[in-house]
Amino acid sequence: MNKMLLTGVLASVAGGAMAPVFAEPAERVEIYGRVDLSMDEVRGNGGRMLKQTDNASRFGVRGSEDLGAGWRVLFGIEAGFNADTGLATDPMLRNAYAGVRGGFGTVAVGRLDSSQATGSPLYSQVTRNITFVGHDAGATAIGTRWLNARNRTSNAVGYMSPVFHGFSVRARYHQPDPGDAAAKVRQEGDVKATDIGLNYESGALSAGIGYGQNKRRGTPVDNDFRRKWQLLGSYSFGATKISALYGRDHYNGTVGARSRVNYWLLGFSLPFGAGLHQIAANYMKRDAQGDIQGKGSNFQAGYIFHMSKRTKLYASYDRENLNANKGGNLLNTISSGIQHRF
């Protein structure tokens, strides 16, 4: 009897020890997205236009699987669509990735941008330090058009480090796909792109420095982008946040065009009324790459009313002049819209 009891106890212990190996790991899946629409009045070149505009609406699925011992598998797919027409964006997928997180940090592969697991080395610095007026889309988009923050790329490997005494690193490498003809048209297929960002956060202070470069196979293309760096930061005085950014882009310049393009931004934001209301403004300047004498400027200001944690109404004004040295570049846009996140 004692022998049978001992055998049963040992079997129970052995079964308990093996259970975690065969048990189904815990998995979390989230469906999310946003719908963002505005009515825009655009004036420029002696004309006026009133239009409804989609501002980067999207939906996605993301999740993780806990492997135990501090290891976790991450995955996600995010698609863009135009809420005003119902048409998908081109390309449709904003990101699509799989990755692993552990004590070493996070690694992800696929089509990567700032909203996936490892972030975007340069664009994530912008979103952390610069307050967008309403959003970074439509008339008020500055991340790509003014700051060249290189948010999204395909065939990429990304890395995000843990935080050490306030410091962290993000890095990303894009490997060309020689068989992807469509990517070549988008100037991705024959370019090796590398981005890295060093970040620091401590209390009210946030700062970062980033570097990016492209290496193209074959003969250099006239006025093609080569490399860049950016330095930026923000500081919160109570509720008020001020931001600053300075950067320089290098191009394969030609006669009459710039090899170096300098740009800068100053901005602030102020929430009030227990966080229900917010005002924000940004002013920036950028050299015109195709005109040695040309400089562009952009001023934008906006008001946001937070109806709930997921829904906001906004109104904004954007005055953009891509090159003050030449006529026909000035646009004034007044927008009012609604954004709902789910």
Image (cartoon, rainbow, N blue to C red):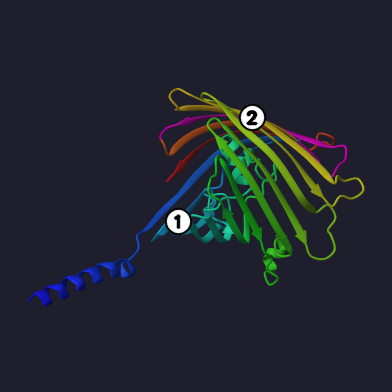
Q: Residue 159, percent across and down?
A: 58, 55
In the image, the segment drawn in magenta is: 286-308
Q: Is residue 331 left or right of residue 110?
A: right
Q: Is residue 341 visible?
A: yes
Q: Residue 186, percent across and down?
A: 70, 60
Q: Residue at x 64, y 47 (%)?
A: 197
Q: Amino acid at mark 2?
A: Gly
130 is within the stretch colored magenta? no
> Disc 2 versus disc 1: distance between alpha carbons?
32 Å
Residue occupying the far front of the picture:
2
State the residue position of label 1.
Answer: 62
Q: Which mark is residue 267?
A: 2
Report crowding for label 2: few under 14, some 14 to 19, many 20 or more residues within 10 A (C-alpha). Answer: many
The quadrant of the rendering that contains the N terminus is: bottom left
Q: Residue at x 45, y 41 (%)?
A: 340
Q: Residue at x 60, y 60 (%)?
A: 157
